[in-house]
Image (tube, grey):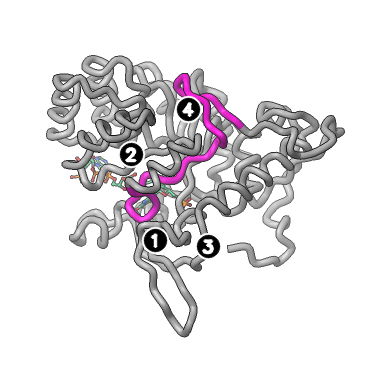
Amino acid sequence: MDNVFDYEDIQLIPAKCIVNSRSECDTTIKLGGHSFKLPVVPANMQTIIDEKIAKYLAENGYFYIMHRFEPETRATFIQDMQSKGFIASISVGVKEEEYDFIVNLAEQNLVPEFITIDIAHGHSNAVIDMIKHIKRHLPKSFVIAGNVGTPEAVRELENAGADATKVGIGPGKVCITKIKTGFGTGGWQLAALRWCAKAASKPIIADGGIRTHGDIAKSIRFGASMVMIGSLFAGHEESPGETIEMNGKLFKEYFGSASEFQKGEKKNVEGKKMLVDHKGSLQDTLKEMEQDLQSSISYAGGNKLESIRNVDYVVVKNSIFNGDKVY
Ligand SMILES: NC(=O)C1=CN([C@@H]2O[C@H](COP(=O)(O)OP(=O)(O)OC[C@H]3O[C@@H](n4cnc5c(N)ncnc54)[C@H](OP(=O)(O)O)[C@@H]3O)[C@@H](O)[C@H]2O)C=CC1
Ligand SMILES: Nc1nc2c(ncn2[C@@H]2O[C@H](COP(=O)(O)O)[C@@H](O)[C@H]2O)c(=O)[nH]1
């Protein structure tokens, strides 16, 4: 791989506008036969999503993926969401008990619309076997598998039956994988996304490293159907992380799913805990994301999300912020 770059190194080039107002631009995206208002999904992490937020997102036409860290609540969660007419979208791991969980769901005829296999190193037989297991017992569920960072991995997971793959090893804000292991897509996530997207025949979710709303448009340009975001969603008043007051200022706690804090032990730790600025309501951020993306679409010279896919771009190494502090 040469010519690597990341979000901050790229600027998309404007094309002639065809709309009279940004409100004409349509940010909706289809995934798994469902239509969602934005190509954005909050990360399936315990300080980012809980049942209340999942319901809010589902009710308001946004995609969501519930985390897997309270495993015993998942069957009831599926029932509860579907009884309200919402999609059920859950996460699983790959350990032995997860195999039984999938069989139990099938026996109870509980079929989540979306199942995400949420593993650090998704290019593995553990994930391939779990994809096959889910497809055998719950063939109607849309399976998102990850995380990966290479075209080979995307192809192997797709061939095993994954309906979408999630790309991003180590670009996350609370990630320390790149430091502890020396591996990953941290620092070149956008180039890795492009590399993977060229091999993909099914949707890709770009996961981690999104620091500004413009990065959503850049992800679409480089082949993502959707982006998964943690840190930008961690600071809301509704966010499940604890609210902390320091020197009269409010913060929210945000921790990695592989942090010592999440795991309860210091074993294979690849994540950290941090505080992010408190920033008002989730609804306001989603609205702002929609408006910013509508604006992106208008700069792309179209009125639909797909128009972003064809725009030209330039590489401006580490310079687009001109010293502005954005995060
Ligand atoms: N996107 C990213 O960059 C990363 C995300 N995470 C997040 O952290 C959480 C925990 O992830 P994870 O540790 O995979 O989940 P689990 O702790 O559930 O581990 C899943 C299984 O995979 C094994 N495993 C984990 N990492 C590796 C590896 N590098 N090589 C071989 N086997 C491995 C584990 O065994 P054992 O523990 O004995 O090795 C275990 O059996 C997830 O939510 C994940 O998304 C974590 C790191 C990177
Ligand atoms: N290496 C680790 N990555 C992690 C951990 N917990 C979550 N994640 C990944 O980060 C993204 C969110 O990234 P952000 O830049 O938007 O904050 C999340 O979706 C996971 O893929 C972890 O402990 N270690």
Q: Element type at marker 2?
A: loop
Residue for point 26% across, 27% down:
125
Residue nearer the viewer, 1 or 163: 163
Q: Dot 2 corresponds to which residue? A: 121
Quadrant of the image for the N terminus? Answer: top right
Q: Amino acid at mark 2?
A: His
Q: Which residues are magenta?
A: 28-50
Q: Quadrant of residue 59?
A: top left
Q: CA distance from mark 3 to mark 2?
A: 34 Å
Q: Dot 3 corresponds to which residue? A: 280
* Residue 31 falls within the magenta-colored stretch: yes
Q: Dot 1 corresponds to which residue? A: 254
| Mark 1 C-beta closer than 8 Å to ligand 2 | yes
Q: Nearer the viewer, mark 3 or mark 2?
A: 3
Percent x, y of residue 277: 50, 68
* Residue 219 falls within the magenta-colored stretch: no
Q: Element type at marker 3?
A: loop
Q: CA distance from mark 2 to mark 1?
A: 22 Å
Q: CA distance from mark 4 to mark 2?
A: 14 Å
Which label is found at residue 151?
A: 4
